[in-house]
Image (cartoon, rainbow, N blue to C red):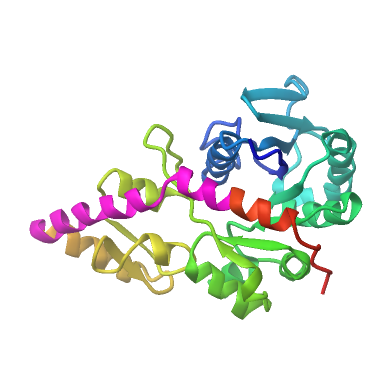
Amino acid sequence: MSGHRLAMLSLHTSPLAQPGEGDSGGMNVYVRELAGAVARRGVDVEVYVRRTSPEVAEVVDVEPGLRVVQLAAGEPDLAKEELPAILECFADEVERRAGSFDPTAVHGNYWLSGVVAHDLKHRLDVPLLVTFHTLGAVKRAMGDDEPRSRIEAERRTIGCADVVLANGIPERDQLVALYGADRDRVEVVTPGVDRAVFSPCGLVALEAAACGTPVVATAVGGLRTLVRHGETGFLVEGRDPDGFAHGVDRIIGDTTLAVDLAAATQVVADEHTWSRGADRFVGLLAEVADRALVPCS
């Protein structure tokens, strides 16, 4: 048993939600699977989410060592775009609950929870770990209308994080290049895949690999790691429809190529397991617990 306690934040999507409903998808699968795997390694884990229904229990025991705590912060039916206004309220509620839990560290998932986890680092005097899943600066570069306030909030969180978790080497490089992250504090912890649990988005490239299906994807973020160009599928720069069509045509039109790509996807799936990710995460948790907190920069 490690003896550590982890406060994991997933403000806008609950690991109890069915993937594909509302904002739930790849991230709530990630939180559920990683939290469970970490708990099975002796870490006591509480996942804090925002209550979106008055009918749900505040505390749900998921498995030994893992609880989901649903906290009231704002009206239950708030849109995702309205959530920045209730971050301080959510932090107050987490602090109320976490005060008796006495966590070893806080782990924020997505930029909203990252902001709250940054606040709680100072309130509770514990290390901050954060996983962004998507980065506002990358989405903005791809043409999405991401607000600059999000990017600046991410930058502040990164500057104070004891560990920033990246899903792959490309994301690590983006954190350094676009946000000035300290490379020594960015650690790669790859997601896993459970063939019994699939999501409609987010982890779809990895889940496709587990099914032996080649993927044509945008050459961005973790997809550069999960899709090996010309080996398990094809990567397309930007969002050019013709580029995607060309990749799909190559696979459909060449049976030998399709079979070879499908065979190679299994290797990628086998390299990405929740057990491996949890081992790395628990190791990092032990490291940050034994060293001085990183001061905000």
Answer above or below: position of 44 versus 141: above
Closer to us: 63 or 282: 282
Task: Specify whether 179 is left or right of 18.
Answer: right
At x 67%, y 75%, the residue is: 182
Residue 79 drawn in magenta: no
Please identify the dominant SS of the magenta region: helix
Task: Specify whether 262 is left or right of 1.
Answer: left
Name the quarter where the N terminus is drawn.
top right
Residue 31's image quarter? top right
At x 38%, y 71%, the residue is: 240
Name the quarter where the C terminus is drawn.
bottom right
Residue 165's image quarter? bottom right
Closer to us: 128 or 135: 128
Q: At which x and y percent is residue 5?
A: 73, 40
At x 54%, y 31%, the residue is: 18
Which region shows up in magenta?
Answer: 255-281
Q: At which x and y percent is residue 289?
A: 74, 53
Q: At which x and y percent is residue 69?
A: 74, 31
Closer to us: 263 or 236: 263
